[in-house]
Image (cartoon, rainbow, N blue to C red):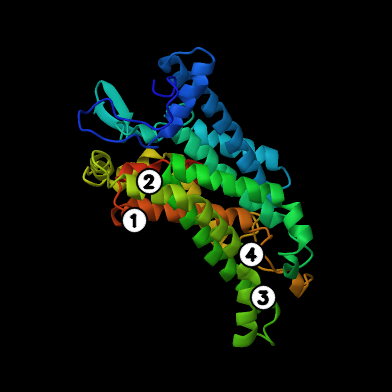
Amino acid sequence: NQGIMGHIANVSKLTNIPHQPALVHSEYAFLGLIGGVFGLNSVLTYHLSRLFLGFIFLLTSFYFFYQVFKSANRQSPIAYSILAFFLSFFVAGFPKILTLNPLSFEPYLSWLVELDVTRRSTILPHYLMGNILFLVILICVIKIINNNPINNHQYFSAKFLILNSKFLILLVFSSLLLSLVHPIDYLVLLSTLGLFFLFQIAINIYIYASSNSKHFNIKTLFFFLILNSKFLILLIFTTLLSGLPPILYYKYTFTLPFWRFIGAHGASTPYSIPLFDFVLSQGPVFLLSVFGIILFLGGWRTVGFPIERPQSHRDEDVGWGNRTTGPTLLLAWLIAQSLFFLKLYELFNFDRLRTLHPPYYLALAF
């Protein structure tokens, strides 16, 4: 309603505590502004936004899968993308048997709408916005990495920057919006990129050492780390700086009268989510993901992501753009979001449910 009336900064209509307008969930006010332009009321604007953003989220998810499988050099990336898409949005969890006679059952953790497979593309608009922006940033990272120059010495050349300028600009803009729309998604994203950086460093060290075993020492290791670190450090630093202003704004806003109670509510509201029930709520997709991770870490060629480096490759070809880029990024995503779900939500002082908002089920389905 406030957006329809032309206001971007919100005030709560559910309290008589004096407080100043703030950009808290201002994305809804922005949707209201759009609805007001077309003469729509708030209810119709809300539900049309869910449908539109859900459609965009589905398209972005499929394109994300396509880019990951393409980066992994799969022969039929579209076919694999369709399969992963099906596992993400059409496969539910295992049923929880309530009674045998008569037979009745319900989903595990049925009270938790974040786990409902039928609502993944029709959930709250700010969930969908966060998911779309989260995927757009990961797509930009994959695109930039796969636009690999002839060798890593050219990562900061004018040609490389021009080639990736549109992805770098989109990365900056999406990071800013993500931290504004959904700060928790933004923190999970930063953690994902940090873990991805460490994993890729380890993979590149293994590749480099296995092909240069006679000349590998501390000096060459240090040079290799510097050479192959500055590129992804730039991406992480760019993402961090882009999303920092909204984070600092929220940190200040949630110290103000009334808003500080909103900020403290999540941290003071415990949710009991048994881990075993959560696993069962993911259904066969969770079991398939565990099997896939084991195969990937084992470097089995049947998965198509061998870590070992062909002897025919030159030393200059060692870099970020290899067949492990996509799977490693998804593995980093799963680990980062799992850490937030299990423990880090306490460190950052927000409620546990918010750690389930990033679309982790896409990483599981891969």
Residue that mark 2 sits on: 355
Q: How crowded is mark 4: few (under 14 residues within 10 Å), some or many (20 or more)?
A: many
Disc 1 and disc 2 in contact, CB within 8 angstroms: yes
Which SS class for mark 4?
A: helix
Q: Distance between the residues labelled 1 and 3?
A: 34 Å
Front of the two marks 2 and 3: 2
Say which label, 1 or 3, has the lower sequence index: 3
Could you tell me how far apart the alpha carbons at marks 4 and 3 are, in whole angstroms? 17 Å
Question: Dot 1: within a 10 Å radius of its alpha carbon, few (fewer than 14), some, or many (20 or more) residues?
Answer: some
Q: In the image, which is nearer the foreground, mark 4 or mark 3?
A: 4
Residue 129 x/y as whole percent: 49, 35
Residue 136 vertical position relative to residue 346 in the rendered view, above or below: above
Which image quarter is the C terminus in?
A: top right
Q: Quick one: SS at disc 1?
A: helix
- The tag earlier along the polypeptide, 4 or 2, is 4
Using a 10 Å C-alpha cutoff, classify the residue at mark 3 as few (fewer than 14 neighbours), some (14 to 19) or many (20 or more): many
Amino acid marked by disc 2: Thr
Residue 64, image x, y percentages: 61, 42
Q: Which mark is in front, 1 or 3?
A: 1
Q: In which quarter of the image is residue 305?
A: bottom right
Closer to viewer: mark 4 or mark 1: 4
* The disc label shown at residue 344, or none: 1
Foreground of the two, 3 or 92: 3
- 226 or 284, which is in the foreground? 226
The residue under label 4 is which amino acid type? Phe
Q: As rendered, which of 120 and 143 lies closer to the eye? A: 143
Where residue 208 is drawn, which disc sits there?
Answer: 3
Q: In the figure, is residue 136 to the left or right of 345?
A: right
Q: Where the N terminus falls, by quadrant? A: top left
Residue 231, numbered circle: 4
The amino acid at mark 3 is Tyr
